[in-house]
Image: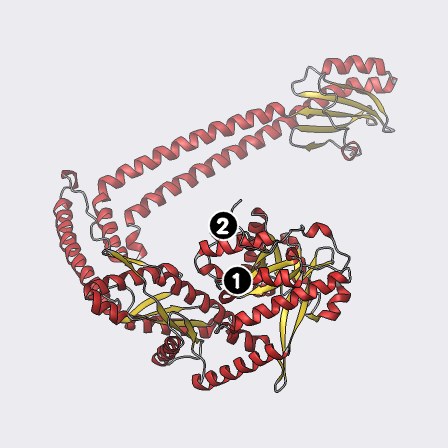
Amino acid sequence: MSRSVKASFTGKLHRLFVTATALVLALTGLVVLSFDFASQRNSIINRAESFSGLTSPHLANVLATDSAELANLLLDNYLSEAGLVGIYVYKTDGSLLVSTIRPGYEARLPQPSVVLRSQIKPSHLFSMDLFQYSQPIWLSDKAVGQIYLQYSLEGVVRQFIMFMVFGLVLYLFSLIAVYFLSKRIQRGISKPIDQILRAMDKVTTQQHFDVRIPSSDENGELRVLVNGFNEMLEQVGLNAAQLKAQQKAIEQHVFFDPLTGLANRRLLIQRMEREVIRARRTGQIGALLYMDLDHFKAINDSLGHMMGDSILMGVAERITGAVREVDTPARLGGDEFVVLLPELGKSDSRASHNALSVAEKVRVAISQSQLVPSSSLQVTPSIGIALFNGENSNYEQLIMQADLAMYRAKEEGRNRVQFYLENMQEHADHRQQVEERLRIALDNDALYLCYQPQIDNSGDIVGAEALVRWQDGENGLVNPAAFIPIAEMTDLICLLGRWVLSNVCQQMVEWRQQDKKLIVSINISPREFQQSDFVEMVEEIILTTGARAEYLVFELTEGVLLNDIDTVLIKMQRLSRLGIRFSLDDFGTGYSSLQYLKQLPLNALKIDQSFVRDSISNDSDAAVVATIIAMADTLNIEVVAEGVEQQEELDYLKQCGCHLYQGYFFYRPVIAAEMTQLIPEFRSHLVQDVVINSGPAWPVFD
């Protein structure tokens, strides 16, 4: 319905009438005020002229005799003039003969205006609270002096304000009276028509079919029209309700799985089309998780299909609870589920990391025991991941890729996560080659460590992060991004982690023998941390090498926190008793709950370099950085900003309250020998000595 109908004609007339009346009254008031102002102004000028004309002959004789005493007598009598607060008499040479000021105004009056005194004809000057008047004094057609008057305008101002207040009150009362009079006329003439128009507007623009117009005898001939309109609305409302119910049922049948309520393949494809278009525009990378429940057929066969359906509904609830609101969980049929994850990052590594974090979170959620009659049942999923960007437009092929990755996860032992990679067989062969060469490199000591210093606000080195490097005999220096993810897919990451920890501890002992001490951070992968004997392994290495555990910081990713939080907490407490501290790496990029920051013994957060890099160009990333630092400060947790490469980034981080930094702006990773030269004089306040004894595991609590 058009705006002209929405705002009724009579309503417009009402507003026009009230507005016109308000303008007329306002203009009338302004005219009256203007006339009064002009009248007051002319009146005070005339008074000053009359007073000057009466007093000038007397003052001329006094000026002729140059008698200040006689002039004072005259001026004292003149102050009886209403409003007059200051009189000054000047000689022709400009010197003051005599002046008098009304008591109480001595400090309030300004000095007479030099401009007015210099005039050879009567002149005046108005200010907010003072009127000044100057006129020459003549004797026998000869100017013998000048009289200068000052009038207080306080009385005039008070009168003017009272007049304005009275006029404003009268104006408001008049407007109110006009408003109610106009409304009364409008109600009597057009109320039913306006109600019908408003009802039509709600029906056509807002689809409100439950609106009704009250009917009364006052409506006269329009009552029949109102009743007929109400009956029509009632029927239309019934039809619309039925139509909406049918549409909802059709939509639920067409786009949602009838058992779990999740999206079906049709809706999933629509969402994928939308997300691919968005990815093409934003440059973001998304992912598709394809999961299948392990040995679900056996559960169906043994417990029956009703119990199987109940388990499927429970799995759907757990998947929904483990993903974000922007993600789309779907069921394709049977025990196969898919989750569409949009906007995981602009780089393959970041998107892969986030997709893996979500997949692990979903895997852990599904793997929790489900209660069934007389027992509990554990169902595990195998999950395949396929990444997509704006170039992927074959959605069925994308689902097939994730499906292939899922089957590879089943082949590798089930209850695990697997990525789809291009030419998967070739990649599997390549991965096997990398695994073999990496295993040989571990045996032949072809790996080495680099250390990237961590800097405080004073520019001092307060620690370093240990980074593994691989010098391959065939391919030269291998990028860590090329072998670390492959190692993390297998237990090889545990061997690599043990090698790194052992070498770091040996290096720390060598530094200590050179009277050099440095706090070193080591990355711990989720698979490595999940080992049942991880704490014992760490204790063994520390005791064997003789290293001091209080100089170690374990950097955990948020993937560690996606597992049993109670088990994670127990391990961290046991390691803390050794003296080891913990830092949460790449904070802000994962999906873990912030509640973990309060539960776990964390000493530091590392802001992911993607936020640091974009903090000077992206307001959202800048806000994330500031929020993380403020939150960590509230929780008494240190913050390390990694990936600092520009002075602008450093300045913003300092402004937000960050104290520790790491990145190419300060130092690139260096080998141990170069790091030895960089280690500053040790500051003992950075660590506390912890005595470590061999033996059984420590109790968790005192």
Q: Position of residue 434 (x, y in %)?
A: 54, 81
Q: Who is closer to the viewer here, 16 or 683? A: 683
Q: Residue at x 52, y 60 (%)?
A: 588
> At numbered mark 1, what does the secondary structure look like: helix, strand or loop?
helix
Three-letter code for the amino acid on which mark 2 is drawn: Gln
Q: Position of residue 170 (x, y in %)?
A: 43, 29
Q: Quadrant of residue 94?
A: top right
Q: Which residue lies at the image location 32% right of the left edge and 48% below the top edge?
A: 12
Give the label, 1 or 2, closer to the camera.
Answer: 1
- On residue 599, the disc is 2
Q: Estimate how packed mark 1 is, as few (under 14), some (14 to 19) or many (20 or more) residues with alpha carbons within 10 Å.
A: some
User: Where does residue 499 sit, x and y in percent of width and height?
Assistant: 60, 70
For this rendering, which residue is in front, 672 or 196? 672
Pointer 1 residue = 534
Q: Residues within 10 Å of mark 2 (few under 14, many from 20)?
A: few
Q: Residue at x 27, y 69 (%)?
A: 296
Q: Residue at x 46, y 65 (%)?
A: 357
Q: Are marks 1 and 2 in contact (CB under 8 Å)?
A: no
Q: Quadrant of the N terminus?
A: bottom left
